[in-house]
């Protein structure tokens, strides 16, 4: 039996303002108010695991222990079949430069690896999101959301972020970056993970 969330305050284990706003708007109708790890002055723990679940657990448990409140974290990224699941947990690292993240470079790097391998089309890929809800007593619940599709080139679209301009979800002839935010939010990996978490722990 999964553990239900009972309180009215939740820590979002992230220093990303966008994630705080996203989760706040999803949970507000349930009477849950969200505060970020950054707002509480909590440090960002080192992500040392090689799976999305492992890294999400590190973040959720660190925040729950430090704040004495339930904490929600997510770890997400892109897995490409022909690259044996890379970039995976290193999705953001592939975009890292000395001056910040450059996702145009990361997309070009991903595509050049596929070209080098002469990977056949369609070049299958998945956006994955793992959510972990942890309590201060050490218990947690987790869910995963997945958006399946293929990678395309050249990059298309100005919406979205990250690798969205080269990811064409199944059932669409447009990339994530060509979809409206409403369209994307209906089918995205994060939307599916949040829906699963709400069913499991909140409703």
Image (tube, grey):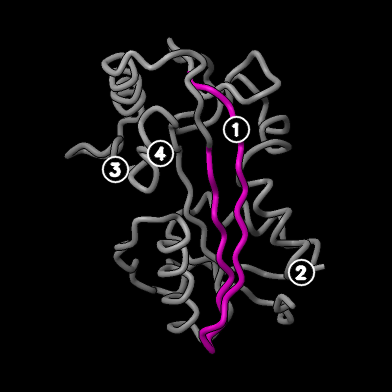
Q: Is residue 15 magenta?
A: no
Foreground: disc 1 or disc 2: 1
For the C terminus, the image quarter is bottom right
Mark number, residue 93: 3
Q: Residues within 10 Å of mark 1 (few under 14, many from 20)?
A: some
Distance (Cα) linking label 1 and label 3: 22 Å
Q: Earlier in the sequence, mark 1 or mark 2?
A: 1
Q: Which residue is tagged 4? A: 85
Magenta region, mostly helix, strand or loop? strand
Distance (Cα) linking label 4 and label 3: 15 Å
- Residue shown at 30% from the left, 35% from the top: 95
Q: Secondary structure at mark 1?
A: strand
Mark number, residue 202: 2
Q: Earlier in the sequence, mark 4 or mark 2?
A: 4
Judge by depth and name the residue closer to the eye, 46 or 15.
46
Apparent side of residue 91 relative to residue 19 in the rendered image (left or right): left
Q: Earlier in the sequence, mark 1 or mark 3?
A: 3
- Residue shown at 62% from the left, 16% from the top: 174
- Residue stretch in magenta: 127-151
Identify whether 195 is placed above or below 60. above
Residue 91 in percent (x, y) is at: 37, 41
Q: Residues within 10 Å of mark 2 (few under 14, many from 20)?
A: some
């Amino acid at each position: 039996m999964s553990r239900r969330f009972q309180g009215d305050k939740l820590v979002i284990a992230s220093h990303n303002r966008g994630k705080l706003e996203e989760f706040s708007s999803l949970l507000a109708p349930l009477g849950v108010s969200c505060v970020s790890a950054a707002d509480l002055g909590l440090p960002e723990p080192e992500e040392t695991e090689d799976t999305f679940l492992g890294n999400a657990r590190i973040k959720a448990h660190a925040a729950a222990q430090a704040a004495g409140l339930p904490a929600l974290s997510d770890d997400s990224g892109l897995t490409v079949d022909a690259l044996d699941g890379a970039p995976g947990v290193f999705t953001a690292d592939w975009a890292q430069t000395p001056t910040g993240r450059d996702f145009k470079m990361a997309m070009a790097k991903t595509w050049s690896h596929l070209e080098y391998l002469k990977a056949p089309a369609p070049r299958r890929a998945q956006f994955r999101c793992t959510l972990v809800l942890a309590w201060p007593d050490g218990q947690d619940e987790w869910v995963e959301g997945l958006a399946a599709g293929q990678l395309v080139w050249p990059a298309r679209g100005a919406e979205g972020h990250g690798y969205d301009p080269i990811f064409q979800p199944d059932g669409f002839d447009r990339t994530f970056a060509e979809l409206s935010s409403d369209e994307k939010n209906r089918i995205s990996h994060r939307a599916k993970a949040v829906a699963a978490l709400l069913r499991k722990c909140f409703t």
